Amino acid sequence: MPPTIEINVVLVRPIYPRNVGYVSRAMANMGAQRLILIDPKCEYDLEARQGAAGAQTHIVEATRYKDIAEFLNREPEGIRVALCARIKKDTDAMSFDDRAVSLVQQQNEGPRPIYLFFGPEDHGLENEDLEYMHFICSLPIFGEFKSINLSHAVMLALYVIRTTETKNAVALDNLNAKSSSKGPGFFFPKLALKEWLTTLGFETGDRRNDAYKVLKRILLNNQASAKELRTLEAIVNQTVRKLGGRPNS
C-alpha cells in the first residue's frame, strides 16, 4: 500500500553534495515527501546529481532556509524529530521504534507532517538546534561503531516509520473488518464508555487525544465477546453511579 503520512527530511548545514544526493535517493526509495535544507554548506552540483543517480527530484525541488527560525516561520506546524547519536538529558526515553509507533498512531486522530532533522556530517546537530525539537531520538545500532553515514541514517529512519505505518494500516483494516463481521446486531457500549470517561475527566471528541477512540481500538483488537462487553458496560455504569454521574471539576 502506498505511504500516506507526510514525512519531510530536514538537513541542517549539510557539508558534502554527494551525501545530499544519496539522501535524495533514499527519500525516493522510502516515499518521503520533501527535502528541506537549512543553511546548506554545499550546492546542488554534478556530484550531488551523481549521488542521487536517477532520483534527483528531491534535491532539484528542495526548500532552502537560512536558519531554523525561518523554517519555523514558513513551514506548517508539525512534529519535529531530531536524530542525534549523542545521548543527552533530553533524549527521548522511548526507543526510536516505539516513538515511531506513537507518531504513526497520532496520525489516526488527525494528519500532521513529520519533520526528521539530521545534522551536518562532522559534528551533528548543535544544542541550539535541539531546543526547537519535540523529540530527540537515537537510531537503533547493534554493532560497536555508532557513527552512521548521513544517507544511511535517513534511510534507516524512514524505513522504521514506513514499516510502522504499514503495520498500523493493516491493524486498522483488521479492526474495521472485525467490526463489520459482527453484523448489524453487534453490541458495543459506546454511550456508557463515553459517559464513564467524561465522568473521570477524560477528553472525548478531540481529534488528537480522544480517550474513547483509544479504548475502543484496544477492546476490539482484543476481540472481546458480546457477553464480555455487556459485563464491561455494567462495570462502567456502576462506576458512573458511584461517582455521581458528574465529571471531575
Image (spheres, rainbow, N blue to C red):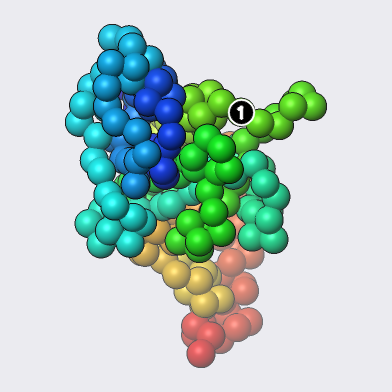
Q: Quadrant of residue 162?
A: top left
Q: Residue at x 35, y 29 (%)?
A: 32
Any part of residue 37 in sight? yes
The x, y position of residue 7, in whole percent, is 36, 37
**Residue 206 sits above or below residue 24 on the image:** below
Q: Position of residue 51 (x, y in %)?
A: 38, 15
Indicate the position of residue 77 as horizontal and vertical percent values: 31, 57
Q: Classify mark 1: helix, strand or loop.
A: loop
- Report if residue 158 is visible in the image: no
Extreme residue in the right direction = 144
| Image: 53 above or below 240 | above
Foreground of the two, 64 or 165: 64
| Above or below: residue 58 compared with residue 66 | above
Q: Quadrant of residue 165?
A: top left
* Residue nearest the observer in this picture, 3 or 142: 142
Residue at 45% from the left image edge and 61% from the top image edge: 132
Tell me which residue sits at (28%, 9%) in the image: 54
Q: Which residue is mark 1?
A: 148
Residue at 56 percent across and 26 percent down: it is: 149
Q: Is residue 239 left or right of residue 58?
A: right
